[in-house]
Image (cartoon, rainbow, N blue to C red):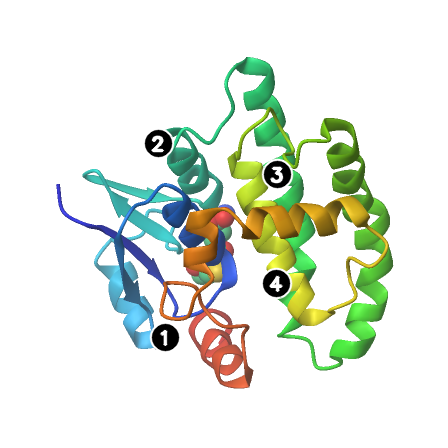
Amino acid sequence: MGKAVLHYTNGRGRAEKIRWMLAACGIDFDESFISTKADFQRRVAEGLYLFKQVPLLEIDGLRIVQTGSILRYLGHKGGLMGENDTERALVDMYTEGIQDMSIPGLAYAFKPDKAQFWLESKETLGTKYFSVYENILQTTNNGHLVGNKQTMADVLLFESFVHYLHIDKDVLNDYPNLQKFMASQKEIPWVQKFLQPGTNRKPFPDEKYVAMVTEIFFS
Ligand SMILES: N[C@@H](CCC(=O)N[C@@H](CS)C(=O)NCC(=O)O)C(=O)O
């Protein structure tokens, strides 16, 4: 079987969580970057993308689209979905919450008035999501959202807060369990390695990236 290939633009967006899950599974992968609208349209015309959308992950002879489906495929493959039906339901539910929680973080770079947008988003994120994960970690009290080892929910929560901490370094000030969680996840050898420069992680989106994405998908 050939090497896995992730199709997306050369930036975070919906693909960054997939990159983190590939790293969590120890899967080496290539990336096929879409860089212009014409390039995207050519790929769509070739029938590469089932719903004419990316991300797409080519893996194990499959072409998987839909971010959630890709993440769950990797979660199962890497044994990161929990140990029983109850844990699997919790991992799935917390993951969906993390995806929803991440939306303002993804939108942030595209907003003309970033300070105002963050001011408006921060409070809702806090009451709706940050405090929920804070309380879950208080209850489990073992540094994991589910069970007693790292699951997909831990990986994706960590990724989301790496992004939010870039937007606002004080975002976790009121959440001691989330702070502890971030510190303990960082100690996990593969996480430590993936955080080093030169891995498949992508930088926080800059103006150039925003302009490219706008041209490809929104023009
Ligand atoms: N439900 C899909 C949505 C994917 C999606 O909207 N991708 C954008 C890029 S981030 C895209 O390909 N847009 C082009 C289009 O929808 O025509 C998923 O979660 O993967």
Residue at horizontal 69 percent and vertical 70 percent from the top: 167
- Along the line of sight, the residue nearer the viewer: 57 or 49: 57
Closer to us: mark 2 or mark 1? 2
Label 2 belongs to which residue?
77
Disc 4 packing (10 Å; few <14; some 14–19; many ≥20): some
N-terminal of the pair, mark 3 or mark 2, is 2
Instruction: Give above or below for 128 relative to 94.
Output: below
Q: At numbered mark 2, what does the secondary structure look like: helix, strand or loop?
A: helix
Instruction: Give above or below for 183 relative to 170.
Output: above
- Along the line of sight, the residue nearer the viewer: 2 or 213: 2
Label 1 belongs to which residue?
37
Label 4 belongs to which residue?
163
Instruction: Give above or below for 26 relative to 104.
Output: above
Contact (Cβ within 8 Å) of mark 1 with mark 3: no
Residue at horizontal 56 percent and vertical 52 percent from the top: 186
Closer to us: mark 3 or mark 4? 4
Residue 163 located left or right of residue 4: right
Real-space Cα separation, disc 3 to disc 2, in angstroms: 19 Å
Q: At numbered mark 1, what does the secondary structure look like: helix, strand or loop?
A: helix
N-terminal of the pair, mark 4 or mark 1, is 1
Closer to us: mark 4 or mark 1? 4
Amino acid type indicated by mark 2: Lys
Amino acid type indicated by mark 1: Lys
Real-space Cα separation, disc 4 to disc 1, in angstroms: 26 Å
N-terminal of the pair, mark 1 or mark 3, is 1
Label 3 belongs to which residue?
96
Disc 1 packing (10 Å; few <14; some 14–19; many ≥20): some
Disc 2 packing (10 Å; few <14; some 14–19; many ≥20): few
In the rendering, at what x and y percent does residue 23 appear? 38, 49
Q: At numbered mark 3, what does the secondary structure look like: helix, strand or loop?
A: helix
Closer to us: mark 1 or mark 3? 3
